[in-house]
Amino acid sequence: MSENVAIIGVGQTGFKARWDSLTYVELAQQAAMRALADASLTMDDIDAVVYSMAPTHFMGVPDCDKWAVDYIGAKGKPFLRVHTGGATGGSAFQAAWAHVASGQYQRVLVVGADRITETPDAQFILNLIWDPLYEQDFALNTVTMTAIATQRYMARHGVTEEQYARVVVRARKNAMRNPNAHLKGEISIDDVMNSPRVAWPYKLYDICPRSAGAAAVVIANEASARNLCDRPAFVSGIGAVTNTVFMGDRCVPSADCDFAEHEEIGIAARECFAQAGITSPSKEIQVAELYDPFSSFQFPELETMGFCARGTAARLSDEGAFDHGGLTVVGPSGGTLCTNPIGVTGLVRVADAALQVMGRAGAMQVPNVRNALATAAGGSTQFFTCTMLSDEPRMASNH
C-alpha cells in the first residue's frame, strides 16, 4: 500500500514577459525559498528534488537545471529533471509524488522556472517537435496545429468565435484576483474579436502569453503533512497518458483518440477520478485549473473529462456555469490563457489548485473547496496529466 502524499508548501514568483532583475536560476531559487517558507521547512529537511524544465533552448543556456542545483540547495540530494513539453510541470509533480508515495522519501521539493522571451521566436523552437522529414515543412506549430483542431470542433458542435472570446474575458477577469498572473484586466468580447488575426479562428487574445517566472511546491507523506500543515492538499488521484508524436496519425478516422475532442485528457481523467472516488465531476469538483493555452481548449476538455455532455460546454459557459458561483469554477487564477511559463505551467496549475484546497488562495479563493483538479498537456499535445487534490486522503485506500 502506498503512502498518502500531500502538498504542504507553495511558492511562486510573479509572471511577466521578462525578468531582467533576476537570472533564470535566481527565479528558481526564489520560488523554492517561498515554498519552503510556506511549509515551515529548510532545505535540510528536504530528502530529494524534482526539477521541472521544458526545452532548454528558450533560455539560450544549455541544460539550466545543472546550473540551478546550487541555487536551490539540491547539492548532496537526489535530483531528477523532468521534460514533457507543456506537461512538464504536471509530470514533474507526479514523479515527485511517486518518490514519496513509494516510501523512499518523506519530503520532496518540486521546482522549476522558464524564460520563454529569451528566444526571439518561441514557435521556431517549438517547431522542432515535428519530424524533420515528414512534418516540419508543413508549417505546423502549436498555434496552427491547434487551430486546425479547433476548426473541426467548431464545425462539429456549432461553436462560435464569440463563445471562445467569452472564455478569454472570464480568464482575464479572474486573473485580476491573482497577484502572480501575467495578463489580466477587464476586456470585452469585442476586444477579443478585434485583436489581430493569427490563425483562424484564433485572434491574438485567444492565445496565451510567453511568460517568465518560477514555481515550486513541497510535498510530504501524511505523517509529516499533518504535523506541519493545518490543512494539507492531499493527492487523491493521478492519471497520465501519452500519444504518438505524429499529428497525421491522430487526424484520421482510424485514430485511437480524436484530436479535436482532446480525448487523451479524458483517458487520464478517468484514471485520476477513479482513484479519487469521483463519479460526478461537476458535482464533486469545485475548482478545475486546466491547461488551456488557447481559448478553444476548455470546451472539449471539460466535455471529455465528464463535466458536461459532448457539445454542451460552450452553452454552459455562456450561462456562467464555469464562473465564480457556477457549477465548477474553471481557472480562478486566470489559467494558462493568462500565464504560460511552459516548463512550469503544469506545476503552476497544481500549485494554484493546492492553494484552493488549503484555503490559502487569497482573493482567488473559491468557497468550500474539497476537490480541485489540475491538468497539463505538452509536446505536440502528446503528453497529458491529471492530478486531483483533496481535503482528505483517498488514494491509498483504493490501492
Image (tube, rainbow, N blue to C red):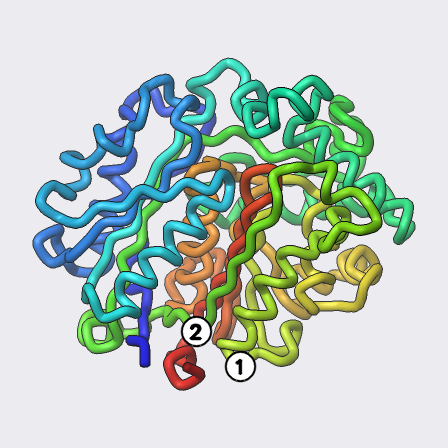
Q: Can residue 173 be seen in this view?
A: no
Residue ID at (14%, 35%): 70
Q: Which amino acid does label 1 sit on?
A: Gly
- Closer to the chain start, of discs 1 and 2, is 2
Query: Which percent across, then down, holds residue 299?
Result: 74, 54
The residue labelled by disc 1 is 277
- The residue lying toward the viewer, choosing from 46 and 362, is 46
Residue 236, numbered label: 2
Q: Relative to residue 181, is residue 320 depicted above or below? A: below
Q: What's the residue at 15%, 57% (across, down)?
A: 47
Asked which quadrant contains residue 39, the reply is: bottom left
Residue at horizontal 68 percent and vertical 30 percent from the top: 143
Q: Contact, CB < 8 Å: mark 1 with mark 2?
A: yes
- The kind of secondary structure element at disc 1 is loop
Up-down relation of residue 52 to residue 109 (above or below): above
| Residue 290 visible to the viewer | yes
Instruction: Tell me, for residue 307, which label it has, or none.
Output: none
Question: Could you say where residue 286 lies in the image, as x and y percent from the top left?
Answer: 57, 70
Residue sticking out furthest to the bottom: 397
- Foreground: 125 or 253? 253
Percent across and percent down for residue 249 are 72, 41
Hey, what amino acid is under mark 2? Answer: Ser
Q: How crowded is mark 2: few (under 14 residues within 10 Å), some or many (20 or more)?
A: many
Q: In which quarter of the image is the C terminus?
A: bottom left
Question: Which quadrant is home to the N terminus?
Answer: bottom left
Residue at the far top in the pictured view: 120
